[in-house]
Image (spheres, rainbow, N blue to C red):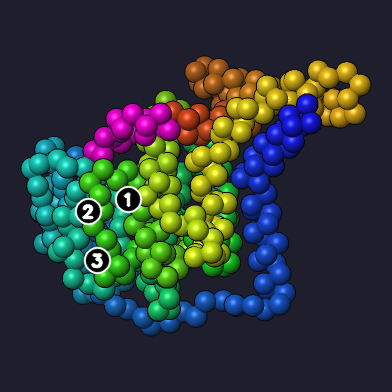
Amino acid sequence: MELLKLFFWVLLFIICYTYVGYGIVLFAIIKIKRFLKIGGPKKINYRYEPEVTLFITAYNEKAYVSEKMKNTLELDYPKDKLKIVWVTDGSNDGTPKMVNAYDNVKLYHSDERKGKIGAMNRGMQFVETPLVVFSDANTLLGKDSIRRMVNLFSDKNVGCVSGEKRIYNHKEDTASGAGEGLYWKYESTLKKWDAELYSVVGAAGELFAIRTALYETMEEDTLLDDFIISLRVAQKGYTIQYDPEAFAIETASANVKEELKRKIRISAGGIQSVVRLKSLLNVFKYGTLSFQYISHRVLRWTLAPICLLLLIPVSFILGQQEGFLFSKLYAALFWLQLGFYVAALIGWFLENKSLRIKVLFIPYYFFIMNLSVILGFFRFLNNNQSVNWERAKRAHV
């Protein structure tokens, strides 16, 4: 029984540290650094204006081309220094024709569909500028986004800059919208603190930039291109920085079913990334970067969801022990867990009834996130996740 008690506290520690504790530890370290005036704000040269390529991969994005190009042409960056590249991999809905109508765009089309990774590997050989900014076709960028990201590259130690993913917020949001929006707000805060401590651990695929020379051709079966590209840059000794005011905005998934489909793919890719970036687990080699990587990413994609699952029966067993000093505590924790999952179930019920009580969507979304990790793990083991685009349906603006 003593071993079971120890096991319980280990499970609880991993869960609390993964979802809340790391943020608290990170905040405390940042406060100490600020008090001791260690590091200080990054030096930024606001006159730094090198040539930049805006790199857009697309598969059947006809519905977004006009809006994306309008947004791109309105970006605040010297027009003669901003090169626009579209790579349309297998598109057969008229996307290439629409893109080709713009004189200031270079289009690289292939009839064969090899997925986003194939498109990126193929298109990057044509990029000649020192910096490249990756963006999705269905996201709109803040007017100053390119300039803000480029400014951070004036520091020679910066190899990658991540922008912020934002979700349109509506009062009528579904569970996916309410949950995803809150999740990204929390992620944004952690990224700001990560960057201040040392480096962000992974970039948002909707908007990130790297030094072109640091790009490595990726394995054709890579699922999380943004994560692999950015972390491989960090492995070379460069930092990944973050500017929340450089943002890409899009609508949330249309519903939880679509969000689950997206999350399962991300989770399978996350587990694949942990395997391929296993050298980053070596804290003796990568130090602070390894600490951030394990705390912010690895635990979420590996141990934490399993710990959540195991904590239920363990707390139930311990809560049943008579004469046990902390039996009431274990029982209370068991019922708290049960209540949380009941709230998630109610959130699911209200989602299907088209009712919008956001507070109940939070546990529902949290449950979906962790369920997707478990499902993603089996998908990774079965090796049946396609690298081709499998875009989730999005809600209307």
Which one is nearer the viewer's eye here, 177 or 221?
A: 221
Q: Whole-Å distance between the Cαs marked 3 and 1?
A: 18 Å
Amino acid type for the residue under numbered disc 2: Met
Q: Quadrant of residue 390?
A: top left
**Residue closer to the observer: 226 or 73:** 226
Q: Is residue 298 magenta?
A: no
Q: Does the magenta stretch include residue 393?
A: yes
Give the amino acid type for the residue marked by disc 3 in the picture: Thr
Q: Do the residues under discs 1 and 2 have CB atoms within 8 angstroms?
A: yes
Residue 205: percent from the left, percent from the top?
Answer: 36, 51
Magenta-drawn segment: 376-397
- Position of 375 compared to 88: left or right? right
Q: Residue at x 43, y 33 (%)?
A: 377
For mark 3, what is the residue? 53
Q: Which of 294 and 135 is in front in this view?
A: 294
User: Viewer-proximal residue, 371 or 164?
Assistant: 371
Instruction: Give the mark nearest the N terminus, 1 or 2.
Output: 2
* Quadrant in which residue 54 is drawn: bottom left
Left or right? Give the position of 20 relative to 73.
right
Q: Nearer the viewer, mark 3 or mark 2?
A: 2
Residue at 29%, 30% in the rendered image:
384
Q: Quadrant of the N terminus?
A: top right
Residue pointed to by mark 2: 120
Image coordinates for residue 64, horizontal then vertical, percent: 25, 44
What residue is shown at x 10% (from left), y 50% (from top)?
A: 109
Answer yes or no: is residue 188 visible. no
Q: Nearer the viewer, mark 3 or mark 1?
A: 1
Q: Name the residue under label 1.
A: 225
